[in-house]
Image: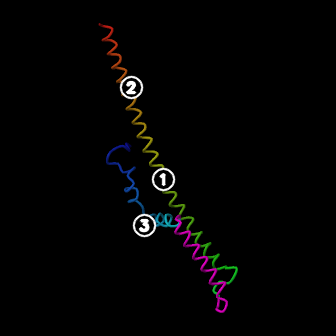
Amino acid sequence: MNLLHKNHKTHNKPAFKANLTFSQRMSDKLTKWAGSWAFIFLILMIMLLWILMNIYFVGQRKFDPYPFILLNIVLSTLAALQAPVILMSQNRAAERDRINAKYDYIVNRKAEREIRDMQNDLDDIKEMINRKVKKK
């Protein structure tokens, strides 16, 4: 199969993205969001707010008193759900990398053949020039 054909879509990034399912696109978006500083700061603010609410609202009924077991469950659930989604997104990124590497290999092989052909042509030209010089 010739990957260098102009209509071939293996190396076309939009075509690769167009083939993704809804859940794959969502996992990519979640991975992008979960790997951002904004997400980290948001989680830290939520945790800080959660802890402050449960420590300083002494007169009221606390919904998760120290040692914050409910907060631990929420964070564990978040980690348990995020991990496989991030892994799915990384697997697709690895597949894109494999496709790009395969395409690069094919391009390099074609360039190598073209260079070899040009070198052979140059050798032929040198040989013809040397024959003409010897005839004179």
- Residue visible at 63% across and 78% down in the picture: 71
In which quadrant will I find the C terminus? top left
Crowding at mark 2 (Cα within 10 Å: few <14, some 14-19, many 20+):
few
* Residue 65 drawn above or below residue 39: below
Amino acid at the residue labelled 3: Phe
- Residue visible at 59% across and 69% down in the picture: 79
Question: For the magenta stretch, what is the residue range?
Answer: 35-61
Amino acid at the residue labelled 2: Gln
Label for residue 119? 2
Report the mark closest to the observer, 1 or 2: 2
* Residue 52 drawn above or below residue 98: below
Give the image quarter of residue 1: top left
Mark toward the start of the polypeptide (3 vs 2): 3
Crowding at mark 3 (Cα within 10 Å: few <14, some 14-19, many 20+):
few
Residue to which mark 1 is pinned: 95
Tell which of 38 and 17 is nearer to you: 38
Secondary structure state at the residue bearing disc 2: helix
Disc 1 versus disc 2: distance between alpha carbons?
Answer: 36 Å
